[in-house]
Every structure is written in C-alpha cells, then in structure tokens.
Image (tube, rainbow, N blue to C red):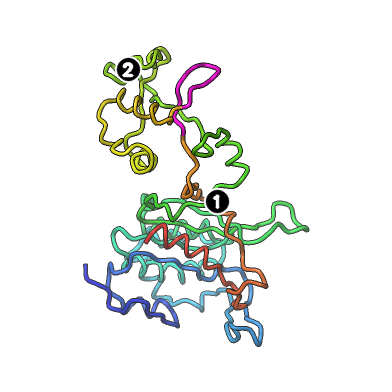
C-alpha cells in the first residue's frame, strides 16, 4: 500500500472517473458519493444564485456509457455483469454501468479498513445495493441509512420523504462526538429520579446468570441467585470511567465485586427501591450524554431557503449530514 498521490484538502472538478484513475490504490480512508439518481429529471441552478451555471441531465441511455465498460464487466466482473442484466430498462442498464465503472475505481482507492457511503434515493437504491454487494462483497455491508430529506407531501399517501445512504466497509466505532442530544420527553421518562447530584435512572446491578463465586453471594441481605442472576457492578465502559473520575477515585481498580458494591453504596450511587428493597445503580444524566444515531436520521434538516449554506445548487446536501459521516468513519 502506498500513500496518496495528491495533497491534503485538494479539490477537483470534472468527471471523478478520470480523476480517480490518477490516484494511488488503497490511499483513501472515507468516500461519500452523491451521484445522479436516474431521476429522469433535468436540474439547473437559478440565474443569479451562488451555484449559477450548475446543471445536469439525470436521464440515461446506452449512448451515455462506453460499451467497453460493459464488455470489461462481462469478462472480469461476472457478478457485476449479472446485476446489469437484471436492469428493467435500457436506461437503467446505462445508469448502472456508469455507476459500476466508478464504484469499481473507488474500490481500488479505498483502504482495506476504509468506509464508503453511497447516497441515493428509492428510484435505484435496490439496484445500487446489488452493485455494491458485487463490488465490495455482502459482508462489507453495514447498514442502509434513511435520511428524511423533506416533509410529507399533502397530495400523496406514503410519500417518499427519505433518501437512502448505503454504508459499506469498516464498522463505526462508538465515539462521543457521534452522539445526538437526548430529547426532553426521553429525559423526563427515563431519568425520572433526582437527588443532590441531579437527574438519574435506576438501572440493574446484576447480570443474567448464576455465579458460583463472590458475584453470586448475598450482599446486604439480597441474594441475586434467587432470581437466577449475579452481581455485576460496572468496572469498564464510559460510566465506570465517569464514576472513577468524578465520584469514587480509584473505583476501577477495586477488584472485589462486593467491595465495589460497598464503595458505590457509601458514595450514594445506589438506589434502594422503596417497594422491593432491591438495590439498583444510579445512572446520572451527564452533559455529554446522548444516543448513538440509528439508521433512521430525522434530526438533520434539509436546507431551507433562509439557510446560510444555501447556494441553490440543485441537489445540495446539508453540511451536518457530511459532518456526521466524517465523525463516524474518519
């Protein structure tokens, strides 16, 4: 594997296929592509807008692609060629051949642990997934993200309001900067207890099995084995780290299960149920708490007319969308 043959923060304009052919193999960590969608529409930015002059036709015929691409796929990429054969129309076949040629080149550029996100809509997303499966392998598929790009149309039932983003490659690692804020209704429902430290939820202190060791022995007259469980006070993870850093210095170095339970109880970190008398761990709401995004994104709004980002480029996407992908996979 060699390094990139281009300078950092380089911007090119032109057909990406021609540009990619001059780039070194396995030199890219992350690819996001927002290609034409085969929408059968013409797009043009308004005169006088920041994107004036930008225009493209999103209608495809076999004259739009190089016949050699299709011949090459038949000879060297039989799985990909079979995808072209299932295209419903000549226009669909043309579009898929155009996309496949570029996706093959992206596969060459991507590092073994790299990630690629293909932005599309329901028009061709099912065909494009077959293309991506053929090029990257089905095991590389991570998820299909649905991004709500517009609001419901009043004249249609089950209107298409979401784009699709096909994510292949390296699985995202959990990063705090990827988390999204908890909404007020969730906080009120889940963090319904309060004390002098603030809001908290009472979560289980035991694990789903019986243990013959210390974790299975009674503590403070509560025997977890009676309900088929064992003590499991946290020792690793974000919350255990927070307890160690903010509440009980050296907590994570406490080896004994009962010793950790005693330390938690002495620090006021255990919620004793007034109804059952059972202990539960207090999990406090902290400033950096948030949920990891699912594969349905409704919290990133489409660009409005008043947005400072708006250039009137026909298919412009919000920076927040790209920001999330970059933070998750780079």
Proximity of marks 2 and 1: CB atoms separated by less than 8 Å: no
The stretch in magenta equals 271-282
Seen from the viewer's position, the closer of residues 223 and 129 is: 223
Residue for badge 2:
216
Check the picture and name the quadrant holding the N terminus. Answer: bottom left
- The disc placed on residue 296 is 1
Residue at (61, 39) in percent of width and height: 188
Q: Is residue 272 magenta?
A: yes
Q: Closer to the camera, 213 or 97? A: 213
Residue 181's spot in the image, x, y percent? 53, 51
Q: Nearer the viewer, residue 307 or 280?
A: 280
Residue 14 spot, x, y in % from top left: 45, 82
Q: Which label's residue is closer to the chain start, 2 or 1?
A: 2
The image quadrant of residue 57 is bottom right
Question: Relative to residue 290, is residue 106 depicted above or below?
Answer: below
Asked if residue 230 is among those painted magenta in the image, a careful observer would answer: no
């Amino acid at each position: 594997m060699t390094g990139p043959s281009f300078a950092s923060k380089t911007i090119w304009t032109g057909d990406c296929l021609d540009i990619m052919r001059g780039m070194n193999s396995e030199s890219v960590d992350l690819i996001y592509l927002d290609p034409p969608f085969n929408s059968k529409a013409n797009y043009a930015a308004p005169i006088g807008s920041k994107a004036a002059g930008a225009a493209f036709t999103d209608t495809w015929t076999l004259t739009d692609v190089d016949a050699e691409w299709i011949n090459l796929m038949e000879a060297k990429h039989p799985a990909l060629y079979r995808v072209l054969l299932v295209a419903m129309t000549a226009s669909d076949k043309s579009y898929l051949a155009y996309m496949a040629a570029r996706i093959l080149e992206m596969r060459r550029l991507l590092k073994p642990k790299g990630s690629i996100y293909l932005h599309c809509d329901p028009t061709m997303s099912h065909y494009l997934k077959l293309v991506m499966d053929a090029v990257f392998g089905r095991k590389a598929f991570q998820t299909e993200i649905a991004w709500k790009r517009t609001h419901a149309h009043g004249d249609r039932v089950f209107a298409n309001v979401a784009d699709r983003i096909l994510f292949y490659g390296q699985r995202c690692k959990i990063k705090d900067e990827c988390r999204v804020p908890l909404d007020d209704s969730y906080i009120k429902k889940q963090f319904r207890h309060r004390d002098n430290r603030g809001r908290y939820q009472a979560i289980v202190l035991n694990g789903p099995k019986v243990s013959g060791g210390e974790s299975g022995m009674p503590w403070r007259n509560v025997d977890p084995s009676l309900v088929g469980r064992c003590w499991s006070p946290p020792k690793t993870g974000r919350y255990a780290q927070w307890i160690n850093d903010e509440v009980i210095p050296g907590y994570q170095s406490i080896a004994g299960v009962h010793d950790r339970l005693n330390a938690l109880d002495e620090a006021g970190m255990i919620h004793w149920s007034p109804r059952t008398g059972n202990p539960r761990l207090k999990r406090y709401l902290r400033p950096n708490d948030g949920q990891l995004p699912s594969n349905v994104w409704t919290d990133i709004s489409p660009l409005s007319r008043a947005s400072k980002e708006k250039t009137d480029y026909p298919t412009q996407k919000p920076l927040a969308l790209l920001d999330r992908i970059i933070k998750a996979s780079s």
